[in-house]
Amino acid sequence: MSRFEHWVVFGCLLAPLVGCATIKQSDTARTGIEQMLISSAVDRSLEKIDFAPVRGAKVFLDDKYLDCVDKNYVLLAMRQKLLAHGCTLPDKADDADVVMQVASGAVGTDRQDLFAGISQIPLPPPSPISIPKFELFGRDKANGTAKLLVVAIDKKTQLAVINNGASLARSDYKVWSFIGGGPIQTGSVPRELAAIGNSDGLTVSQTQVAGRSGNATR
């Protein structure tokens, strides 16, 4: 039996064991999962910051030090926190009691892929065919990371009202697959989606987990 025939027999033996999956492509530059990873990490980071010291004050939010992806979400989430503490938000620093500055140490996503099985094997030339990847177990994991630094300064005394160091938080999304089963989704983002009842039927392929956009780091 030739080498090519050996590969054909091997492929035929594996064929009944290989499952099929539907790959859903994103219609936008960034997937909803990637954006959820970032916004959830930002929410978690801000939850660790105590805004009580500026409760009821006139706070000017200075964003000149903030340079990150989804900057507008970070700023609006902070404004929401301040409003929830009874603050007023003047448009000018001259009209404020407190100037609050925010900077980002990290706002983004990363991913790690893990699988046990056999990688795709190309057949010897001139055949253009490859034996497909055979996966016994697979796990695609993506994290959102937000490291935010918030400093609030009293305009009259020039003393720090809030200065507790950087607040670091992460969100996660995992897709598990097994022979004959999966995908199974776990992590903070699926739990957040499940909480609003919109997680049914959500299937994210390996190419979607971190969006594979310019904003995702690996």
Image (tube, grey):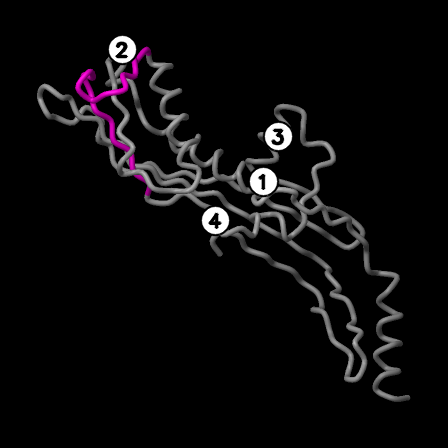
Q: Dot 2: within a 10 Å radius of its alpha carbon, few (fewer than 14), some, or many (20 or more) residues?
A: some
- Give the percent coordinates (x, y) of residue 166: 29, 38
Q: Amino acid at mark 2?
A: Gly
User: How far is the residue under mark 3 from the one under mark 1?
Assistant: 10 Å
Which sits earlier in the primary sequence, circle 3 or circle 1? Answer: 1
Give the residue drawn at x 29%, y 32%: 63
| Residue mark closest to the camera, 1 vs 4 | 4
Q: Amino acid at mark 4?
A: Asn
| Residue mark closest to the camera, 3 vs 4 | 4
- Give the percent coordinates (x, y) of residue 18: 82, 60
Task: Depth check: give the residue in front, 101 or 196.
Answer: 101
- Residue 192 falls left or right of residue 164: right
Q: Quadrant of residue 188?
A: top right
- Give the percent coordinates (x, y) of residue 156: 10, 19
Q: Dot 1: within a 10 Å radius of its alpha carbon, few (fewer than 14), some, or many (20 or more) residues?
A: many
| Residue mark closest to the camera, 3 vs 1 | 1
Question: What residue is disc 3 on?
Answer: 193
Q: Which residues are magenta?
A: 86-104
- Residue 16 falls left or right of residue 49: right
Q: What SS does tag 3 mark?
A: helix
Which sits earlier in the primary sequence, circle 2 or circle 1? Answer: 1
User: How far is the residue under mark 2 from the one under mark 3?
Assistant: 33 Å
- Residue 218 falls left or right of residue 184: left
Question: What residue is disc 2 on?
Answer: 56
Which sits earlier in the primary sequence, circle 2 or circle 3? Answer: 2
Question: What residue is disc 4 on?
Answer: 215
User: How far is the residue under mark 3 from the one under mark 4?
Assistant: 22 Å
| Residue mark closest to the camera, 4 vs 2 | 4
Which sits earlier in the primary sequence, circle 4 or circle 2? Answer: 2
Q: Amino acid at mark 1?
A: Ile
Let me know if residue 148 is in the magenta part. no
